[in-house]
Every structure is written in C-alpha cells, then in structure tokens.
Amino acid sequence: MSETTELSVIEIKPEQAPALYITNGLDSYLEHIKASVSEVPDLSTKKGRDRVASLSASVSRSKAAIEKPGREYLKRLKEAVKPAEEEIKRFVDACNALRDETRLPLTEWEAEQERIRLEEEAKKSAEALAKEVELLHEIALGENYRRDRETADAAAEAERQRIAHEEELRRQAVEQANREAEERLQQERDAAAKREADLKTQAEQAERDRIALAQKAEQDRIDAAAKAEADRLEAAQKAEREKQEAIAAEQLKAKQEAERIQREAKQKEDARLAEEKRVADEAAARAADVAHRKTIGTAIVNALTSHAGLTREQAIATLTALKDGNIPHTSIQY
C-alpha cells in the first residue's frame, strides 16, 4: 500500500464524527495504522532506512488526518452548547434582579414597621414610668399634708391640756411642746427631703431607662436591617447554587443526549458496515467461484486439446455442452 493510498483511506467526514469520536470509536483506524507499518525493513540498507522513516511519517499524517476533524467536531459541540449556557445565565440573572427589585419595597416596609414598633414600645414604657413617678410624688405630698395636719391637732391638744394645768406646768408644757414640734418638723423636713431625693433618683432612672430603650430600639432596627441583608445574601447564594446545579444538570442532559445520538449513529454505522461487508463477501465469493470455474474449464479445454485431438474451438464447444448438461451421464465437479 502506498503512502497516498493510506491517506486516502483514512478520511473522516463530518457526518461520521458522532459515531467515531466516542470511547474506543477509533480502534479500527488505530489497527489499520498499525497494520500499515507492521513490515520490518532492512536497516542495513539505505532503502530500508528510508522506508522506516517513510512509515513513521505516514503514522504522523494518519494521526493528523483523524485528529483534525475530531478537534473540529469537538469545537462544534462546544459552540452548540455555548448559546444555551449564555441564555440560561441571562434569564436567571434577570429573574434574580427582578425578584430582588420586586421584594425591595416589602423589605424596606418590614424594617420600617419594626423600627416604629420598637419606638412605640419604648415610648409606652417611658410614659408608664413617668406616670408612676408622678403618682409617687402625689402620694408623698399627701403624706406630708396628713402629717402636718396631725401635728397641728397634737399642738392644739397640748394647748388645751396646758390651760388645765397650773401656770408653771403650762409654761413647761409649752416649752416641751415647742421642742417636740421643732424636732418633728425637722424630721418631716428630713423625710420630705429624702422623698424628694428618692423621686429625683427615680426620675433620673426613668430617663436612663427611656434612653436605654430608645438605644435598644435603634440597635434592634440595625440588627433587623443586618439580618434582612444577610437573608438577602443567603438567598442570592442559594439562587447561585441552584443556578449552577441547573447548569450542571443541563450539561449532563446535553452530554447524555449527545452520547445517545453517538450510540445510535454508531449502531447505524455498524449496521451499514456489516451490510457492506456482507455484500462484499458475497461478491468475493461469487468472484472466487467464477475464477474457480474458469480454472477448471481451462484445465478441461487443455486436456481435450491435448488428449482428445480436438481443436481449441471444438474443446470449448464440448466444455459448453458439458456445462449445459447436453451430454448424458457426464458432469463437471467444481
């Protein structure tokens, strides 16, 4: 087989690619290449060495003849998948953006409602504390009035007792009553001052509580906004994972479909090659039979001309009569 013949045999057409560029799909070509270089030239001669170099070069040319259409087929497959990947990505990105844009007013509204709720709770707590402080203040004032009234009644009673006693006892009683009254008044003043200080402390504590509640409300609003952002990021990450999984699933599906098409194409190609082989085998058998019959016919004609004294034309006519069964009790064994 010449090098030109080898290259003309190894020719991959585009429609053959799906059935060939699969697992073990090129084995027949590999075996063909191995067979074409199986000879063992004599390296002691220049002709033999030149033949080895030529065989090696033919392997490279055959490899290129198979690899180039394979690379082009692989490129077509990648280009066929690329538009689907780009369209899926464009669609998913658009839907994600539309989803986030659609929910943004609700997210902002929810954050605002949470802030308002926390402010209302802080305001109610502060108002309740202020009312409690005011009530305590009123109670303290009432207690002061009651004690003042009791003190006045006690003083009047002492005065009536003083009139009933002798003048000296009245003087001593008045002095004692004055001392006691002064002591009680001082005690009342001290108690009132203490109550006032307590009320002031409670008011200051109420203000601190109000400020703490307001700060807590603000912090809760910030935390709610941060949580909303974290939830949004988590949702975006989840959507991205789902997108990647969908892409992988589509790629797997496309790969499986391509493999199915390749299998079907291979089955069709195998069936076609089998049919061609059957036809070729039948043709070869018929050709071999014709050649065999021709050899036997030639031997008969030569024998008739050599041993029966017939001319070649007569021998051929006799052979024809024998083949046609015109001579009884005779036959030709092929």
Image (tube, helix red, strand yellow):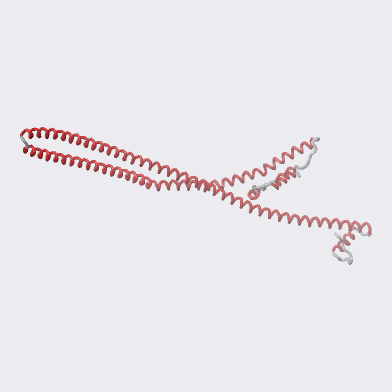
- Name the foreground residue: 87 vs 153: 153
Specify whether 26 is left or right of 114: right
- Name the foreground residue: 19 vs 14: 19
Quadrant that contains the C terminus = bottom right
Q: Residue at x 44, y 43 (%)?
A: 233
Specify whether 310 is left or right of 235: right
Quadrant that contains the N terminus = top right
Q: Position of residue 71 (x, y in %)?
A: 62, 43
Q: Position of residue 45 (x, y in %)?
A: 80, 35
Q: Residue furthest bottom?
A: 328
- Residue 150 picture quarter: top left
Task: Please count the marks in the image.
Answer: 0
Q: Residue at x 68, y 47 (%)?
A: 26
Q: Residue at x 64, y 43 (%)?
A: 68
Q: Position of residue 242 (x, y in %)?
A: 50, 47
- Name the foreground residue: 50 vs 257: 257
Specify whether 265 is left or right of 194: right
Q: Position of residue 222 (x, y in %)?
A: 37, 40
Specify whether 132 is left or right of 63: left
